[in-house]
């Protein structure tokens, strides 16, 4: 009924063992991903509502992503002002991403990333609310 697998698994080494990353490495990857997503939303907000706070936050977040990725920086799109997304929606998205980053940073005992994530949660939580109700 099923065709047998003919090739070797990409998950095994020549010795036959399964390559594994450490828990810390997995958490680094996860944290860098959450922070990179937060950076993307921060850049979107910077394009719509420029501010010194957002510029500073973007630099700090980019620095953390680079640190977690061993010096490789996050890919960033050029800033282009637009009005397609309500800034309040972006602030909510950023707050959620910062919360996810905070959970992973706390799990990994990364104080620097945890402080940054908590600060971003506070900043985005204090942003003006949208005129539309949030539906989940």
Image (cartoon, rainbow, N blue to C red):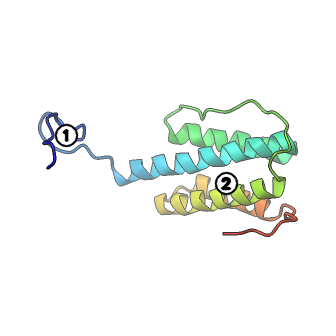
The image's mark for residue 116 is: 2
Q: Residue at x 45, y 53 (%)?
A: 27
Residue 62 screen position, x and y as percent: 65, 39
Q: Residue at x 72, y 39 (%)?
A: 59
Q: In this rendering, would 110 be left or right of 1? A: right
Q: In this rendering, would 48 be left or right of 36? A: right
Q: Secondary structure at mark 1?
A: loop
Residue 51 screen position, x and y as percent: 87, 44
Residue 56 makes an appearance in the image: no
Q: Secondary structure at mark 2?
A: helix
- Residue at mark 2 to residue at mark 1: CA–CA distance: 38 Å
The image quadrant where one finds the C terminus is bottom right
Residue 5 screen position, x and y as percent: 15, 40
Q: Which residue is mark 1?
A: 12
Disc 2 vs disc 1: Cβ atoms closer than 8 Å?
no
Q: In this rendering, would 113 be left or right of 8? A: right
Q: Residue furthest front?
A: 1
- From this view, report whether residue 10 is shown above or below residue 132: above
Q: Nearer the viewer, residue 64 or 130?
A: 130
Q: Residue at x 77, y 57 (%)?
A: 89
């Amino acid at each position: 009924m099923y065709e047998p697998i003919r090739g070797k698994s990409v998950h095994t080494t020549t010795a036959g063992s399964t390559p594994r990353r450490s828990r810390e490495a997995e958490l680094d990857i996860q944290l860098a991903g959450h922070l990179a997503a937060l950076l993307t939303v921060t850049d979107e907000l910077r394009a719509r509502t420029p501010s010194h706070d957002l510029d500073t936050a973007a630099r700090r977040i980019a620095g953390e992503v680079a640190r977690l990725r061993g010096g490789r920086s996050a890919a960033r799109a050029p800033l282009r002002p637009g009005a397609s997304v309500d800034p309040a929606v972006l602030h909510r998205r950023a707050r959620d991403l910062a919360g996810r980053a905070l959970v992973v940073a706390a799990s990994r005992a990364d104080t620097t990333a945890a402080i940054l994530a908590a600060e971003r949660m506070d900043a985005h939580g204090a942003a003006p609310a949208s005129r539309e109700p949030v539906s989940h």
